[in-house]
Image: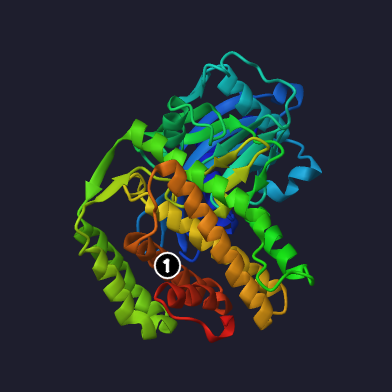
Amino acid sequence: MSRPEGTALRPRLERALAAWLPWQRWFGGKGRPVAGVEVEQLVELVDQRASGGPLGLLAVVAVRFADGGDAERYQVPIGVRTALPDRLAPAVLAGFDGCVVYDATGDAELNAVLLRLIGQRAVRGGVGFTPEPSFAGASKRGLVGRPIGAEQSNTSIVYGDRYILKLYRRVAAGLNPDLEAHRALRRARSRHIAPLLGSIEGEVGGEPATFGMLQAFAANAAEGWAMAMTSVRDLFADTDAAPDAAGADFAAEARRLGGAVAAVHADLARELGTGTADPRSVADDMLAHLEPALVAVPGLAPYADRLRAAFAGVGALRERVPVQRVHGDLHLGQVLRTPATWLLIDFEGEPAAPIAERTEPRSPLRDVAGVLRSLDYAAQHQLRLFHPTPELRRRARRWTAHNREAFTAGYAEAAGGDPAGRLLTAFELEKAVYEAVYETRNRPDWVDIPLRAVRRLLGEEDLDDR
């Protein structure tokens, strides 16, 4: 067929996608049998076939499931070529009448088209490519876009060492919280985000939707998780370390990170507003999440009553709980250390949750608790790579305590108040309970990490840690 689009392409593309989508790492419906796929939008972005290049399309597809649950929408950039380079073979979706149809995110030519469309403020079939003022009018020719392979729920394309375009694979009606937060933080002139340069927006189900976000690429940046893991590794490997060694090399960075998180919270509060929540409603929410967790994780049973008491105690707080927009899923993998400062990334939240839920005002202490739990995970993760002797367990405990103190001190200094207290402990416990459920379902031999945290936060000492 000479032009494999429109009504001729859709039925075969839908069948191909139904078989292909469940195998993609970013597909959120794993474990649910796919009943069918409907291509709701198929927008032509570029046609370079006359010069031997690809046809580029943007597809938005609705996936229906055999269990009768809600359908899910996904974005799939599609390329069509008559001759496919070997490097694109893993991305093939299907072959139609002498043409090969494939996922276009690995195609440098089509990735370059996306960048040019943003620079040109283009509109294609109702999809708008919008640059920020510092990016407007630029052709951006000559930059090769390569996808980052480590992501789980989206696909990001890096152009040289200058730009990064995040394509949201799962799309929903409404402004994506990631784009909304970055716009707010840009207005606040935040130093702790990568500069926002553009966006790709359209509609799904007749409502506005976000397809992509372009930012400056943080070259020469290190991920917080990798830095913490290196610090713990070096502490464990130092056979000459003093008995009270705590891995002080990361503490200064943990303190700076605490200040950066507090600064972002202040900027989000100023730009997107604040409120308060009844402490009883916060407690009720914690208790509601606890009960199914007790069923899923038998190891939580000995602590059930004390966990209920800790969460119920939040409801006895005399003052209302300050709430605002927060990151929502903050941990050491969501922060980057550049030569100049710490950056927070990925304000999207859980893609499977409704946007209204992801943008709901929450206590900023949830973000603080997320980082504190991540520090503990870094030490315990590294411990598994060594023989966990009593001495190394003690070092892991000291490293965690030392860097927890540094992070909270940095946060307190910037925020003007110490975050420690009953509410923060409750949020840490809630996070540890969530982790216990996750590990039970996915990595049962790791469930001891959150269970140790539960014991510690409830005031119990592990015999192995003495």
Q: Is residue 312 above or below residue 57?
A: below
SS for callout 1 = helix
- Classify the position of the N terminus by image quarter: top right
Q: Nearer the viewer, residue 289 or 389?
A: 389
156 with respect to 386 (left or right)? left
233 is higher (above) or lower (below) than 455: above
In this image, 2 relative to 68: left or right?
right
- Regarding residue 39, the answer to whether it shows in the image is no
Q: Is residue 177 visible?
A: yes
Please, is residue 106 above or below residue 112 in the view?
Answer: below
Left or right side of 208 for 85? right
At x 46%, y 48%, the residue is: 411
Report the residue at 74% width, 44% height from top.
88
Instruction: Provide the residue designation for mark 1.
Output: 434
Image location of residue 143, percent across then percent down: 73, 26
Left or right relative to 134: residue 48? right
Among the 4 quarters of the image, the one containing residue 9: top right
Residue 44 location, x and y as percent?
55, 28
Percent from the top left, x then y, of residue 307?
33, 75
**Crowd class of label 1 (few under 14; some 14 to 19; many from 20; radius 10 Å):** some
Q: Residue at x 20, y 54 (%)?
A: 278
Residue 103 picture quarter: top right
**Which one is nearer the viewer's eye here, 299 or 107?**
299
Q: Amino acid at mark 1?
A: Tyr
Q: How many marks?
A: 1
* Residue at the (53%, 17%) spot, across then down: 121
Which residue is at the front of the view, 26 or 292? 292
